[in-house]
Amino acid sequence: MLANLFPFMNWIKDYNTETLRSDTIAGLTVALVLIPQSMAYAQLAGLPAYYGLYASFLTPLIAALFGSSRQLATGPVAVVSLMTAASLEPLATMGSEGYIAYAILLALMVGGFQFLLGILRLGLVVNFLSHPVINGFTNAAAIIIATSQVSKLAGVSVDKASHHYETLIRVAQGAFNYTHLPTLAMGLLAFAIMIGCKRFIPKIPNVLAAVLITTCLSWAIGFNHDATIPVSSIESSRVQSTIAVFNGTLASAEKLAMQRTGLSKELSAANAMGESLRALNIQHELSTIELRLAGVKDQSHQLRTSLRNMLFSGVEQSDGTMAFYLKNGTPPAMHTDGRTWRLRVSNTQVSSTALTMMGGGAVVGTIPSGLPTIAAPTFDLSAVLHLIPFAVIISLLGFMEAISIAKAMAAKTGQRIDPDQELIGQGLANMIGAFGRSYPVSGSFSRSAVNLQAGAVTGMSSVFASIMVVLTLQFCTPLLYHLPQAVLAAIIMMAVFGLLNVSSFVHAWKIKWYDGAISVISFITTLAYAPHLDKGIMLGVALSLGMFLYKSMRPNVSFLSRSQTPSHRDTTLTGLENCKNISVIQFEGPLFFANASFLEDIVTEKISENDSLKHIVLSAGGINDVDCSGAEALELIIEKVQAKNIEFSICSANKTVLAVLQKAHLLEKIGTDHIYATAEEALRNDCRVTRAAKETTDGPLPAACLRAS
């Protein structure tokens, strides 16, 4: 009982010094990869980088103690991070306090759903996400994740569009206007270090090597060079007026948003009180405000883009302050500092007294020291209703990723994996992690592989990895200040390259063309509708279920004939000759309401195309169940066949099918002498009867019938 409640009891009881040493080394090795990766994935999820560390100090520990896999490394992963950003983007601005609160709430919901599935032993529900759907989605997600990091490699900032491809167009336009070459060089250097270490020095964690080298280089050369100035330091009236107009549009947008919130509450109250006319008027006002708000948002986007595209030269004044002039607008007598400066403009108003100018590359910046405050996530009913479908999808996707990795490692270690227990472990990790300000997490393929290769024996390796994250949060956060954002982008891109698998589309198509088609459609839909990633999955699931229903409605039906051996084979596949007097019909699958009429149509067609037919044998070996509709259809078939003076027999039926036929009184209509154990027995009996009939007329039995029987 204790082992069921606390799975770690199974391995902790035999723990020894040698195992402790192996787990310690593995845990430290995983932590060296986990710390930079988690920060990168947090930014992919639209959160500050240090929230990746918050998502990494409780979740690996809980998942390892309460899951069934001893080597699975849980924490932030690419696909779940991308899905988190896609689900939260409509609710709040990325990185804002509201956005962070919703991300933590989403983790609680994801964990709750996974835990409930595990407790109810419903791990099989994940089978609704078929392999073709997951394959198409994963390949598309890899492309979306990789391309979403291009802006950080180029050192440009753009507003996200309603579709991912539109965002990429904006990135291309921004990069064409100005690419920060030191940022690009830093990203390319990170790629070179990771690829070089992976190929030539595989024992060294390539991610850690890239982080250490680029962070030290960033600090040494002053890669980050920001300046905080008043707007008056910009020597351009056009720029100053643009900033003023931009701030005005944001103020208007905020005012309209507040009006929309108030009207929404009034509308709910009017509907609750049944005041339809008042509700109609409020709805009209809401529509008007929505149109005005859309116009103001578009205007603010245009102004923000214009400000971001402005390039400046900095001139140091006699008093030590800096003055900034538009590029090519610097007075001839003045000497610039040689840097190209840009405005840092976000979705908030630009401060007139503390405007940030960027003269270098972007870095992680200040990370709060210490552990996050343990607190319950903020509950918002409207946000919960919005997040439910996303929480379900993330739960299933995350679990599929985790269980696939766990099973792959179990094949090497010989360990037994319990999917339901793994659901409980992942669910608890997400739920408890939410109290530590974590966003949704799952099992990581790359870190799990590192964990296994480093010699992890039990879940204690994940405990040591968590301890390393805690020590980092407590004492090492200042060391991460100069870590370039471009390096985090390179880490993400390197991690997701392994998700691309083009050959899987060809493989699926070769096995079943419709599986290949579903995979391709899921892939294209996910790409086309990104960042609304749920649409690709939902369409893929709908197509998979539709194909399943179609195959159930039209199961495989074959016509059997006897070969040179006593076995019976499909005449279509083998080219064997059919007997004109006897037809053996093999039906494969349950006979139920969805396909009962299909069997009836097959029999009717067989009768109509063969006037010489004397006997129909239904080979029921492939029928594992018959429902009420199936029994009624079978009764109609028997009556139709017997009305044509054709015999009807059943062979190879199992006990379940025979029990249904008996309850439906069909055995009486068929006749117990027409129930055979095998098709061979049915044909031999029919052959004896036919021979006896032929002998009375001194006529030969047709050769085709002899071969068939």
Image: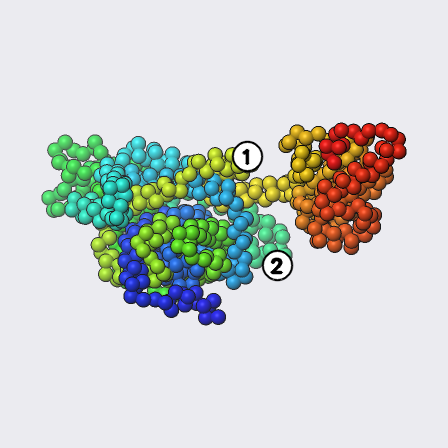
The number of callouts visible is: 2
Q: Nearer the viewer, residue 522 or 332?
A: 522
Please tell me whether mark 2 sits on a helix, a strand or a loop.
loop
> In what quadrant of the picture does the C terminus appear?
top right
183 to the left or right of 441? left
Please tell me whether mark 1 sits on a helix, a strand or a loop.
helix
For disc 2, the neighbor class at 10 Å (few under 14, some 14 to 19, many from 20) is: few
Dot 2 corresponds to which residue? 273
The answer to whether residue 614 is visible is yes
Q: Nearer the viewer, residue 332 or 420?
A: 420
Dot 1 corresponds to which residue? 513
Along the polypeptide, which appears first: circle 1 or circle 2?
2
Residue 264 x %, y %: 52, 53
205 to the left or right of 655? left
Judge depth for marks 1 and 2 and give the one in front.
1
Image point (83%, 39%), residue name = 689
Residue placed furthest toward the left: 318
- Classify residue 487 by image quadrant: top left
Q: Disc 1 residue type? A: Trp
289 to the left or right of 550? left
Residue 84 x %, y %: 42, 50
Q: Disc 2 residue type? A: Met
Q: Please say if 141 is above or below 402.
A: above
Q: Which of 75 and 382 is in front in this view?
A: 75
- Give the alpha-carbon distance from disc 1 to disc 2, as whole Å: 55 Å
For disc 1, the neighbor class at 10 Å (few under 14, some 14 to 19, many from 20) is: some
Residue 5 x %, y %: 46, 68
